[in-house]
Image (spheres, rainbow, N blue to C red):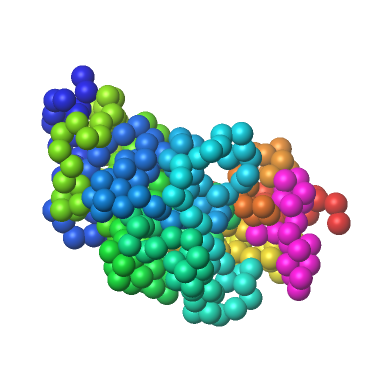
Amino acid sequence: MSGTDFYYELQARLGEELSAIAPMPGPHRSFFGNSGTEANEAALKLAKYSTKRHDIIAFFGAFHGRTMGSLSLTASKVRQRQGFGPLMPGTYHAPYPDTYRSGLSADATTAQCIDFIEQQLFVHLVAPDEVAAVMVEPIQGEGGYIVPPESFLQRLRELTRRHGILLIVDEVQSGMGRTGKMFAIEHSGVDPDIVTMAKGIASGLPLGVATAPASIMSWPPGTHASTFGGNPVACAAAVATIALLRESLMKNAEVVGAHLIAGARALMEKHPLIGDVRGRGLMVGLEFVRDRRTKERATTERDALVKECFRRGLLVLGAGRNAIRLSPPLVLTKEQADIALRILDEALASLPR
């Protein structure tokens, strides 16, 4: 039956668990869907409904999903948008802070991005009092596993509060313990207005959630719904997943993740193709360049490396134009991380020079 028409006990239990871990003050309400894009669509609709505004700001490199609203905010690969226009009107994009690419200090990189919103978007394209929300990944996933300076999220929070804009944090990839905290936004000490989650929340079962304070999620019954969103099996899996994260897996992500990042950085001494290693917990990115001085992107080399790793039994995915992501299960051990590093070392050594 539809959880938006009748209550499942497990849905209520999961709602209580989510309220306990939500990265902002409560009391909270949660909308249950089936996927990350559905969670983000709910967040977009909620932001517009709550603020009575219509425009949304996102970031270059972002990936928020493939349905029309979340796709309109996605700006990772042109292929993902090509052929589907016109997309949702009233969407704008700003640069995401990448200190490796900017070559500037953390604060200067942050300033470039915040200044673009204030001095370009708000001056030339959209009035701040017409912006309902800013949607941001606290660590950019598809865009290259880019970890922004803490000052970026803090200044973004200050900007949104100043203009009455809601801050939506997309934790679909970075949440549920992956970075060593329940949500990646917690590393910055910033309280969002709406948080979205999926992927790891139910350990692979179809579930997506948008959670917000009850003061924001005040829409009446029937305003938004999902027939099978939050089905009881997925809710049971999510309740069990949260318990495991609290018990050991979140800490394991922190400890083994630090070990994996240190090992990947050690490979930089042997392989000049590795330009940068970054990440938090078990959310680790490696960026490849042909020359560390010029930072020329090693795109074909990255693609070849993904295939070489696959042939040797290590599954990695590309991220951005020239990076790979290491995003293993949170049960990963140090010994298994060492095996992955050995295979990565061998795969790098096999590439033509």
Does residue 342 appear to the left or right of 261 in the view shown? Answer: right
Does residue 68 appear to the left or right of 191 in the view shown? Answer: right
Q: Position of residue 166 (x, y in %)?
A: 30, 58
Q: Answer whether residue 106 is visible to the viewer in this image.
A: no
Q: In front here: 216 or 287?
A: 216
Q: Residue at x 20, y 27 (%)?
A: 3
Q: Answer whether residue 69 is visible to the viewer in this image.
A: yes
Q: Is 4 in the magenta?
A: no
Q: Residue at x 23, y 27 (%)?
A: 232
Q: Is 303 in the magenta?
A: yes
Residue 192 quadrant: bottom left
Q: Quadrant of the C terminus?
A: bottom right
Q: Residue at x 43, y 60 (%)?
A: 126
Q: Is residue 132 above or below residue 223?
A: below
Residue 296 quadrant: bottom right
Q: Residue at x 19, y 34 (%)?
A: 11
Q: Position of residue 350 (x, y in %)?
A: 80, 50
Q: Furthest-top residue in view?
A: 1
Number of marks drawn: 0
Q: Is residue 312 above or below residue 19?
A: above
Q: Which residues are magenta?
A: 287-305
Q: In front here: 274 or 337?
A: 274
Residue 281 quadrant: bottom left
Q: Position of residue 339 (x, y in %)?
A: 60, 50
